[in-house]
Image (cartoon, grey):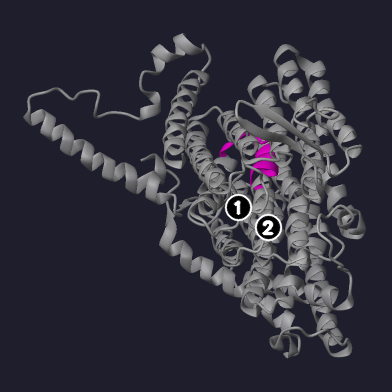
Amino acid sequence: MTLPGFHPFLPFAVAALLALVTRGSLRSAVLLAAPAIGLWHLVGVEPGMVSTWQIMNLELTPYRVDELGLMFGYLFHIGAFMAVLFALHVRDTLQQVSGILYAGSAVGAVFAGDLVTLFVFWEILGLSSAFLVWAGRDERSVAAGIRYLIYQVASGVLLMAGLIWHGALTGSFAFGEIGAGTPAGILILAAFGIKAGFPLVHNWITDAYPASTPTGTVFLCAFTTKVAVYALARGFPGVEALIYIGAFMACYPIFFAVIENDLRRVLGYSMINQLGFMVCGIGIGSSLALNGAVAHAFNDVFFKGLLFMSMGAVLYVTGRSKASDLGGLYRKMPITATLCIIGAVTISAFPLMSAFVSKSMVMTALLEEGRVLVWLAMLFASAGVLEHAGIKIPYFAFFAHDAKLEAREPPVNMLLAMALAAVFCVGIGAFPGLLYGILPWEAEYHAYDLTHVLTQLQLLAFATLGVVFLHRTGRYPAEIPGVNLDVEWLWRKALPWSAGIVRSALGALAGALGRGVAGFRHGRLYLAGERGLRSALSRSWPTGSMVLWVGVFLALMLIAGVLSAGAGG
Amino acid sequence: MADGNPGWAERPRNRRLIRRILYGACALLVVADFVVQRHISAGVERVPAFYALYGFVALVGVVLAAKGLRRLVKRGEEYYDR
């Protein structure tokens, strides 16, 4: 059976291939054209379109169009265009090819009609984005990229195990509502949860996003977690646990965000906080709440993207992203500062801004369902957003004490991409009908009633007053260099430490047996045998070690896949 | 300032003005709370100026709690590299 029109992944795949063989402005044109052509095509696509594919004994649905998929499809095309535009000055094949492939795999995932196709795009999503982390090309980004990939592979393995089990139980791989009632459902929920930044498995966001390049992070923040929100909304609407998981996600990162010094890491915590609102909305499961969750995901790509872009621009121009190093840039980067403030005002959900019209849907749904305690927690989180994302980000980057840094406005493509995001922040806020018109569920909602506007303004004005009070009384915490321990400490410190004990015990044992253990003692795994690999696999560092690791992970995945297939069958 | 030409955001007059606008807005919003008939969904919303009080307390609470958290979790920048 032929595909109707073409599969939306196609323009991205073609662009990734063409980007390999083109250079300079031709490549830029190719990369911009992919999402533009894709979006043009998508506007003409009607919900209800399905195409099936017989492969061996499996009947797959690689392409299924409905309102939910279509909404995320539009979003990812616009998001991809924005991210490509922001990175248009970059001349780096690794980033450009993996970036466009990554965006395309997000598009493919939301049009996947079955779990097997979803799995394929899920893996491309994880793998291609890891290269965006590695594109930082320093020790930090290589290490963070490997940790990032471990999370992504774990999510993929869980998804594969879950989908095979689910298929065996239900006799179908179709991706619809799954529910958390079976062990297979729990496995799939866990797979989605890792990519959604659930508590305990959230540190890949705060670890890898700040380690990527100024432009790579903008790609990263737009797709992976939003695909996860999409998948949760489709597979697990109304699963009650998600209400509490979401509320927890909305609350705990704000404490870390307040004391974090690296502003891009602050935005990583802020991202988990916003995901909390979406996950909570999915857990409530009413039409209004689900619409609110996906609408908030839509808006988040632009306001969080705008904040990541403005910090990316600051990093690009000054080489710094730590609050303790920055300050006073508003005079040298007035346009960037203004755009950053628009993003900050939006994420704080001021009326007339996009987050206001989507977040208030989740808040209203909580009250409608009588979940007052969770609602209070989310209201608390809303005040917290104002502090770390609304005030801290623009204040420490552009105001505060003048760090006397050399700076200028970033390249014009960066400014244009930020302006595009700002247009969506204000446009959707002022004309919410534009977004409400493409929401998948039927629910009547009006953001701009007097109560909503008044109460939100009261909350935000007095939270701002709180900041002023803390500043004026000298209680506001200073920005100081340092790292803050989080759950990741377990595997970044405790695990190697215990492994070290085991290793030295083994070493002592081997020594006692009279064997040499030189070479076993030193060293980080990723450097092992580096020289030999470099010449064998690639001449440029660190691609060589990367290729090895990709090979290792793919092999592990295959083994895990085969094992879980055996268990499921 | 050393360069003798502070920007608008550094001038005390402007900073004071911004603060006064905020204080004025806060006052207006509290007054409005007694004029406007808000919809009430949860009982706690009946508290006069509930949202204003909650916003202020939540924010101050978050920041002070985070300062406490910092004492627990803050380490040197090279912590993970050692």
Q: Describe the element under mark 2 as helix, strand or loop.
A: helix
Magenta stretch: give its range.
A211-225
Work out which quarter of the rendered image holds the C terminus of chain B and state it: top left
The residue at the point 49 percent across, 35 percent down is A140
Q: Badge 2 sits on which subunit?
A: A
Q: Is residue A426 above or below residue B42?
A: above
Q: Is residue B9 above or below residue A336?
A: below
Q: CB atoms at circles 2 and 1 under 8 Å apart?
A: yes
Q: Amino acid at mark 2?
A: Ala
Residue A538 visible, this orientation: yes
User: In the image, residue A441 lies at what x, y percent?
Assistant: 81, 59
Looking at the magenta stretch, what is its main secondary structure? helix
User: In the image, residue A501 lies at what x, y percent?
Assistant: 22, 42
Label 1: how many residues lie within 10 Å, few (<14), some (14-19) or many (20+)? many
The residue at the point 51 percent across, 66 percent down is B67
Q: Amino acid at mark 1?
A: Val
User: In the image, residue A31 lies at what x, y percent?
Assistant: 78, 25
Q: Is residue A357 above or below residue A483?
A: below
Q: Is residue A412 above or below residue B13?
A: above
* Tag of residue A33: none
Left or right: residue B36 versus residue A55 is: right
User: In the image, residue A69 lies at what x, y percent?
Assistant: 77, 45
Residue B6 visible, this orientation: no
Q: Describe the element under mark 1 as helix, strand or loop.
A: helix
| Nearest the eye: A371 or A359 | A371
Q: Which residue is denoted by mark 2 in the rendering? A: A389
Label 2: how many residues lie within 10 Å, few (<14), some (14-19) or many (20+)? many
